[in-house]
């Protein structure tokens, strides 16, 4: 037996109106077309579902059983259709973004808040990833957009600067630099151990090479901010950190100081896959971030 939704609708309409003309009108069919549908249903199920007379149409005993089945099937169908519409509507307004953890905590929430004032239906799916992984997620189309802490060199990526933040010097309160009222790059480059991040990190890639690769300085190389936190607490060296990451180092034994006369900055970029057509809502957010940079 192979019945269509159209046939079920016709059957239930006749159950409701008990009149071929009114039932046909209720689902916008001609009476001959409607009568053919009812005939085709009865032929498919193999029994008579209605008793017809000149005044009224009545359900047979088999018809009553089939009415319950048809009503259940239509409820399930309408529920599924409703879920599908909800899915389509939510997808229509969903924006997926991959960003550095520090960006997802300190920068992205403000962007989302301001954008939701313009597009209240927009919803965000955010993945916090290292910058290299953000680039890969954009290229592989796992996300619509990425926000990273260095300028990607991959030709498959289109990049635009949206934010610039300063670097600070961070060290233990018992370090000799704590006695200085101002700290310059010259102070940093003599007789200090610098804790630096590995070459794949955005912090490494956005710092000037002459600062993190000075032959007269001893280095400890790390990959994780949690490792850095422990080394700073044990007074094992000094480090450079961009402003967005400083909230992780609020501790009474750790000092954060500006670098006098230095112009160390990290630029934040919005990225998308080159030549990829974004959804309407994602493109609006992308343009919003570009406009935000132009205003600032």
Image (cartoon, grey):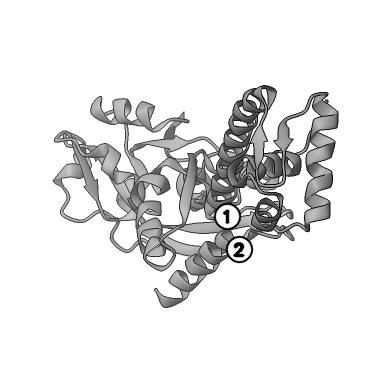
Say whether residue 71 is left or right of residue 129. Answer: right
Question: Which of 262 and 123 lies nearest the eye of the viewer?
Answer: 123
The crowding category of the residue bearing disc 1, from other C-alpha atoms within 10 Å (few below 14, some 14 to 19, many at least 20), is: some
Say whether residue 92 is left or right of residue 29. Answer: left
Residue 189 seen in render? no
Q: Residue at x 60, y 47 (%)?
A: 17
Q: Residue at x 83, y 23 (%)?
A: 46
Q: Residue at x 60, y 49 (%)?
A: 88
Label 1–label 2 contact, CB within 8 A: yes
Residue 92 is marked as 1
Mark 1 or mark 2: name the one nearer the start of the chain: 1
**Residue identifier under label 2:** 280
Q: Residue at x 34, y 50 (%)?
A: 106
Tell me the mark number nearer the camera, choosing from 1 and 2.
1
Q: Quadrant of the N terminus?
A: top right
SS at circle 1: helix
Tell me the CA gap for discs 1 and 2: 8 Å
Residue 123 seen in render? yes
Judged from this view, the residue extending furthest toward the front is: 54
Q: Position of residue 157 (x, y in %)?
A: 68, 55
**Looking at the picture, does residue 67 appear above or below residue 202?**
above
Question: Which of 151 and 207 lies nearest the eye of the viewer?
Answer: 151
Q: Quadrant of residue 234?
A: top left
Q: Position of residue 223 (x, y in %)?
A: 47, 31
Say whether residue 170 is left or right of residue 201. Answer: left
SS at circle 2: helix
Q: Position of residue 152 (x, y in %)?
A: 62, 53
Q: Position of residue 142 (x, y in %)?
A: 64, 41
**Looking at the picture, does residue 35 appear above or below residue 217?**
below
């Amino acid at each position: 037996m192979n019945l269509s939704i159209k046939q079920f609708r016709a059957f239930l309409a006749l159950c409701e109106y008990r009149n071929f003309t009114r039932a046909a009108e209720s689902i916008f069919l001609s009476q001959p077309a409607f009568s053919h549908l009812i005939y085709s249903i009865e032929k498919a199920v193999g029994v008579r579902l209605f008793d017809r007379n000149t005044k009224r149409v009545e359900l047979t005993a088999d018809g009553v059983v089939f009415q319950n089945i048809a009503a259940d099937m239509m409820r399930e169908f309408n529920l599924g259709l409703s879920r599908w519409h909800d899915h389509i509507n939510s997808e229509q307004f969903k924006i997926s973004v991959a960003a550095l953890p520090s960006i997802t905590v300190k920068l992205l929430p403000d962007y989302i808040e301001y954008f939701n004032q313009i597009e209240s239906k927009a919803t965000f799916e955010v993945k916090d990833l290292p910058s290299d992984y953000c680039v890969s997620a954009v290229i592989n189309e796992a996300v619509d957009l990425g926000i990273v802490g260095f300028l990607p060199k991959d030709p498959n990526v289109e990049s635009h600067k949206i934010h610039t933040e300063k670097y600070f010097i961070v060290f233990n309160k018992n370090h000799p630099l704590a006695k200085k009222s101002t700290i310059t790059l010259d102070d940093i480059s003599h007789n200090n151990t610098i804790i630096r991040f590995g070459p794949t990190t955005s912090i490494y890639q956005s710092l000037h090479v002459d600062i993190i690769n000075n032959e007269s300085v001893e280095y400890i190389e790390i990959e994780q901010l949690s490792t850095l936190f422990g080394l700073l607490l044990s007074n094992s060296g000094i480090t450079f950190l961009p402003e967005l990451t400083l909230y992780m180092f609020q501790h009474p034994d750790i000092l954060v100081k500006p670098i006098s006369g230095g112009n160390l900055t990290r630029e934040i970029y919005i990225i998308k896959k080159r030549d990829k057509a974004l959804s309407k809502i994602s493109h609006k957010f992308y343009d919003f971030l570009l406009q935000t940079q132009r205003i600032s």
